[in-house]
Amino acid sequence: MRVNQVLATILLAISGCASAMAEGHHYEFILPDHYIGWIQVIFQDPDAPPITNVGKSHLFTIPETGIYRTSSTRVIAAKPSDTFFYRVSTNDGSFRLKRVPSNYVVKGVNDGGFDIAGERGTGAGRGWYIFIGPPEIRSEVPFADWKTELESRIRKYGTDETGPPNPLPIPGRMSLDHIP
């Protein structure tokens, strides 16, 4: 009887893990209003707090600098369901969330971004870069459509193992003065 209880417990744990993997991992990004530019999430920073969890979501409140630090480890889902919102101030001094237009983020591998070992490619931790912005601006920014960049590298070199962009993008709100 005891063996059956252990087996039942193992089966429940396996089915729970399988359903969690099927649902995917969910990150929710809250950006400053009208933010366009690179964001960088730095994982495994021992001096930073863990990710804030709200329900089933892991919440990143991105500051104007575009850099968010956490001591947590990044989990990559087979089917990412990350969501992006702008934090919009209201007349009464509070704020509301407004969904970032869907075409402002390239969906797919790493939500169109890329990750590297270390904060800026060296050292401990892991950096995740994502570009936020409309397609017409993204087309003017090197590496902003990382999904297309990977596809191009695979066609050209037969592999995507050519490393991260060099130089790495600088996180923060873009000045749009030079963009038509």
Image (tube, rainbow, N blue to C red):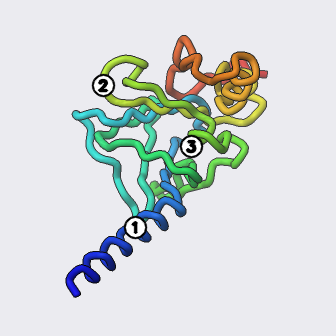
Q: Residue at x 72, y 44 (%)?
A: 103
Distance from disc 3 to disc 2, alpha carbons, whole Å, reads: 31 Å
Local crowd at mark 3 within 10 Å, few (<14), some, or many (≥20)? Answer: some
Quarter of the image with the N terminus is bottom left
Residue annotated with mark 1: 14
Q: Is residue 21 visible?
A: yes
Compare residues 110 and 94 and report the one nearer the observer. 110
- Please identify the quarter of the rendering in which residue 13 is found: bottom left
Crowding at mark 1 (Cα within 10 Å: few <14, some 14-19, many 20+)? few
> Mark 3, mark 2: which one is toward the viewer?
2
* Sooner in the amino-acid sequence: mark 1 or mark 2: 1
Does residue 63 lie above or below 80 as drawn?
Answer: above
- In percent of the image, x 39 and y 61: which residue is there? 54
Q: Nearer the viewer, residue 89 or 131?
A: 131
Which residue does the image show at 54% across and 62% down from the upper left? 22
Whichever of callouts 3 and 2 sits on the residue coming sooner in the sequence is 3
Residue on which disc 2 sits: 124
- x then y, percent, for residue 123: 32, 19
Left/right placement of residue 20 relative to residue 44 reads: right
Determine the CA span between mark 1 and mark 2.
32 Å
**Lateral position of residue 11 relative to residue 34, left or right:** left
Determine which residue is flagged by label 3: 33
> Who comes first in sequence, dot 1 or dot 3?
1
Label 2 environment density (alpha carbons within 10 Å; few <14, some 14–19, many ≥20): some
**Figure quadrant of residue 67:** top left
Secondary structure found at label 3: loop
Q: Mark 2: which amino acid? A: Ala
